[in-house]
Image (cartoon, rainbow, N blue to C red):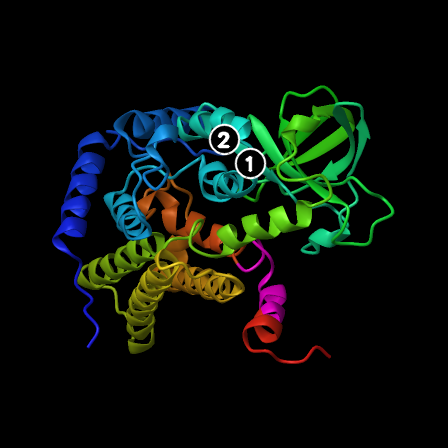
Amino acid sequence: MIDLDLSPRYEAFRDECRTWLLDNKPDRALESMDTPGGFEQHREWERVLFDGGWSVPAWPAVYGGRDCDLMEWLIYEEEYWSSGVPGRVSANGVSLLAPTIFNFGTTEQRDHFLPRMAAGTDIWAQGWSEPDAGSDLAAIKTRAIRDGDQFVINGQKTWCSRGAWADWIFCIVRTDADAERHRGLTYLLVPADAPGLERRPIGRLDGEPGFAEIFFDDCRVSVDNALGEEGQGWAVAMAAAGSERGLNLRSPGRFMAAAERLRVLATELQSSGDRIDCRLRDEVTDAWIRSEAYRWQTYFTASRLMEGDELGSEASLMKVFWSEMDLELHATAMRLLGDRGELAPDAPDSVDRGAWLDGYVFALSGPIYAGTNEIQRNIIAERVLGLPRR
């Protein structure tokens, strides 16, 4: 028999973080983090979390954390998303870059970057994708040539998440032009105000610059900003990609909260006289079941990791599952709302100020970012199932 009940210690931890989040929740909705004003509002929220000790609970206390284990972190994430507090503008840093700094960074890099990241002093953008590389990171062309104690960077990055307003960018660059594909890459940490760096916001369909193009024109960065050894950037990037696809970026709490909101939406629409056919009711039920299945799979995975196991290529399984679950969940909401789902946030009949439409548009990108699902299925076939390459 499997015992799915949490221990008294974990239940007490849940009560503690739930109480703090509800007591410190902003009294008004913040503007979008993809606007200049909203970005700074969210940065202020990061500082509130940090001052309360809830910015990075799974980190060591010396860097602003609480030394929480993986189970406590998953519980915290559940409470975070269910409480309705603002999203994390620092997610690229605390969820993707930080685990990589812990694994590959020097003591000096950890001491400098991690506390500032936890406090929201430095917000990070992801600079991986390039116009001609797509999801193939090994095909990147941005060059970084060693010149004494500096790298001189030339090239372009695109679709840089948080790139329009971030303070720093973590990039993969090619430092050995003669090396083949996965070799000769280096992982660099680049200040966004470095001379020779230009960023151009990319407007989405809603007009907000959720991404940016980054151009490097003889941009100089200290060699001390290389994360890991020069030429070993592929190994560093793959560790970061595992964090992006697996536990760190998309915890179950996010989808459990969305599934509960979907259940409430269906109940309220039906109570107000809307007819909801059996097919849509089944979709709502399926969304709730899938979010719970993802939760328990993640708890199982966390328990293995706590015993010393490694995540490995299983991260690709998780990524495919959560990205397609998120998209279908929001598509169900749009079908429930019908024409009202397309209304602008300030329209008289808008539901939840257009949050479902925003969520749906964002979910459309889920099967693409963090490595397209087509690529992830190849990884699953070859490395998880052991199928031969054709």
Residue 210 percent coordinates (x, y):
55, 38
- Label number found at residue 110: 2
**Separation of disc 2 and disc 1 at Cα?**
6 Å
Q: Secondary structure at mark 2?
A: helix
**Left of 145 or right of it: where is 54?**
left
Question: N-terminal of the two: label 2 or label 1?
Answer: 1
Answer with left or right where residue 247 lies relative to residue 68: right
274 vs 322, nearest the viewer: 322
In the rendered structure, are the residues bearing label 2 and label 1 in contact, judged by CB atoms less than 8 Å apart? Answer: yes
Residue 118 forms part of the magenta stretch: no
Q: Is residue 16 left or right of residue 216?
A: left
Mark 2 closeness class: few <14, some 14–19, many ≥20 residues within 10 Å: some
State the residue at coordinates (56%, 33%): 106
Q: Toward which corner of the image does residue 6 lie, by quadrant?
A: bottom left
Q: Residue most toward the right? A: 178
* Above or below, comparing residue 261 to residue 184 in the picture: below
Q: Amino acid at mark 2?
A: Arg
Report the front residue among 268 and 383: 383
Label 1, secondary structure: give it: loop
Where is residue 1 shown, x and y percent of the image?
19, 77
Instruction: Tell me where residue 202 appears, x and y as whole percent.
Output: 63, 37
- Residue 250 vertical placement versus 320 (above, below): above
Residue 295 visible in the displayed image: yes
The magenta region covers 367-379
Which kind of residue does numbered mark 1 sit on? Gly
Residue 164 placement, left or right of 58 = right
**Alpha-carbon neighbours of circle 1 within 10 Å: few (<14), some, or many (≥20)?**
many
What residue sits 31% from the left and 46% below the top? 352
- Viewer-proximal residue among 272 and 114: 114
Per the rendering, the mark at residue 105 is 1
